[in-house]
Image: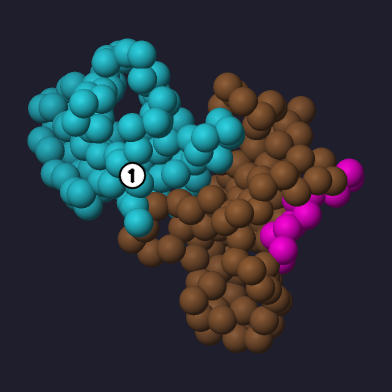
Chain colours: A cyan, B brown
Amino acid sequence: DQQVKQNSPSLSVQEGRISILNCDYTNSMFDYFLWYKKYPAEGPTFLISISSIKDKNEDGRFTVFLNKSAKHLSLHIVPSQPGDSAVYFCAVPFSGGYNKLIFGAGTRLAVHP
Amino acid sequence: NAGVMQNPRHLVRRRGQEARLRCSPMKGHSHVYWYRQLPEEGLKFMVYLQKENIIDESGMPKERFSAEFPKEGPSILRIQQVVRGDSAAYFCASSEGQSNTEAFFGQGTRLTVV
């Protein structure tokens, strides 16, 4: 029973173009969403987050969009760079605990020159 | 200012042996979380500990797995009588507070059961 789904296991994008990573969730009570980035042989690092009271949050090249009615969020990376090549996880806190997180399965992004 | 330190980075155990995974949180952090990542899957929450207390172990398998975070020293995740299905990457995260504070992850311990 996956509460957070990332249906695209991989994505390949050319350098300079936009990368769009998608995430769907099932529980309309979720009110905070996070994206993590993970390089091989390293732990996840926090990238960007969004509260359910917003529909967009931007940080430099990274923007997260939230569509509550569709229970969908997306991460946009513009422009994509080779160093962005990593696995991206969306995550949602369990109720009652900020750092007790439910992770999606991840999307492996490859940015090629 | 060292980050979250996990050791060993790689651990190989034979079926039936015990595995001990260690996690030293960031300085000043008293909240520790353990997650497990199976191949091609996301991280799954296992247990949340504060110093000397287990706060939430709802993600821990009922048998063979235990965790502690003593007053002094690192947090330990112990797996007794390991089986092949325990092979995974185990990540520890720490945070300064319980809510509304970012958790920082260690590099993980990759356990291989042969």
Q: Quadrant of residue A14?
A: top left
Mark 1 lies on residue: A4
At horizontal 81% and vertical 46% (from top left) the residue drawn is B53
Is B75 covered by the magenta stretch?
yes
Badge 1: residue crowd in 10 Å (few <14, some 14–19, many ≥20):
many
Q: Report the number of numbered marks.
A: 1
- Tell me if A59 is positioned left or right of B3 in this view: left
Q: Position of residue A44 (x, y in %)?
A: 46, 41
Give the magenta-colored segment's residue range: B66-78
Q: Depth check: give the residue in front, B90 or B65.
A: B65
Indicate left or right for A65 with A30 as reference.
Answer: left
Residue at image location 82% in from the left, 41% down from the top: B51
Toward which corner of the image does residue B33 lie, by quadrant?
top right
Q: Residue at x 67, y 81 (%)?
A: B81
- Image: B53 above or below A50: below
Asked if residue A46 shows in the view, the reply is: yes
Relative to B95, residue B51 above or below: below
Three-letter code for the amino acid on which mark 1 is drawn: Val
Q: Quadrant of the image for the N terminus of chain B? A: top right
Helix, strand or loop under label 1: strand
Residue A51 x, y percent position in the rendering: 39, 19
Residue A82 seen in the figure: no
Q: Chain of mark 1?
A: A
In the rendered image, residue B13, in percent from the top left (x then y), is placed at 62, 79
- Where does the image place residue A108, in percent across and percent down from the top left? 26, 47
